[in-house]
Image (cartoon, grey):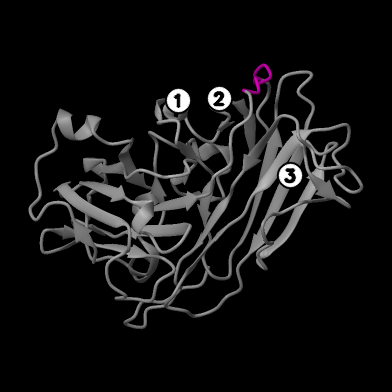
Amino acid sequence: MIETLSSAPASLDQEDLVTSDLEITGITFADGDLSRPRYPSLIDHSRAPGVQFEPGIQLIANVPRPFTVLYNIDPSANVIFKQDGNLPVVQSVAAAPDFGPVSGLSAELLDSTTCRLTWNQAEAVSTSTALRILCEPSDRTPTGPEQVDGGVYLTIVHRHEAGTESIPAAPEGVHEDGTIEIRGTDSHGRPRYDLFHSGVSEDLAPDLELEISFRVRAGASVELALHFSVATGSDLHFESIAGQVVVQPDRPEQLQSAASSDQGEKCSLHWVRPAQETTQGQVASFFLKAADGDSGDFAGRAALAGRHTQIDPTIIQPPSCTSSGICITQ
């Protein structure tokens, strides 16, 4: 359980909506499965149907301020937020069960289907955090898999890098199945992904950035392609060596491949999580850089100082077992 901003739920009104930095509304669950949330106001889930995307926020300020995220479940889903008394139940994916309050986090229920989180990075103990906000069906008993990893999620990464000048996007073309396009950057140098609905990033404060975040169950394999589509003359390429995109600061062991193709304009990630029974999950965050250059091969070239953008995937690996002994793989 976590700390709360309010000891009692309040009704949702217009003032509640406008005070949040990011509003994720109309949440549903694919086939009614609580472990497969859908965020239609934020994410275009058709971009890579086999990947379980979750909301991800990167803090890009040197001294981050507290920020708030509002979650609202569509009433037609017949799902409510799980409560302990009048408080929402929120867990850190990487912490042991019943570890206690999450440092840097407070939350409140506005009603049974509306929850608001407030994050203060200055009080956090990690630069990468994955949160699970537990939910439960309002009309049935949750299944075993739903008890293990059902609910909605949020990843938060604190990494500062000054943005470069805006990189314009190329004209719209034919979307490639299973591919996320990075369509230039906005006026603050933040990458614009077609995974997120247009307008959402523009409404975010300049010190917040939407980033790619996805969840992988134990025993699962995920392939995700990232494709640059930028204006003629931008000449951006993923920095790569011998056909593999450079992964910084460290390459997670589950990342089997980060293959570069099309002269460095594409990167395909292959992530494999071994089947393992564990009550404690993990969160992994790394970055890939694309910069001006004559070649997609980074080997032998001096460090690039021109225009660039940084792609920061975060992968959530939730526990595969509950503390009561319910386990799932795949």
- Answer above or below: position of 261 versus 259: above
* CB within 8 Å, label 3 to label 1: no
Q: In x, y percent, where is residue 239?
A: 78, 44
Q: Which residues are magenta?
A: 166-172
Q: Which mark is residue 202?
A: 1
* CB within 8 Å, label 2 to label 3: no
- Residue 300 visible within the image: yes
Q: Which mark is residue 267?
A: 3
Q: Which label's residue is closer to the chain start, 2 or 3? A: 2
Q: CA distance from mark 2 to mark 3?
A: 21 Å
Dot 3 crowding, Cα within 10 Å, few <14, some 14–19, many 20+:
many
Q: Which kind of residue does numbered mark 1 sit on?
A: Glu
Residue at 83% from the left image edge and 32% from the top image edge: 293
Mark nearer the viewer, 3 or 1? 1
Q: Which mark is residue 155?
A: none
Q: Which kind of residue does numbered mark 2 sit on?
A: Asp
Q: In x, y percent, where is residue 19?
A: 23, 33
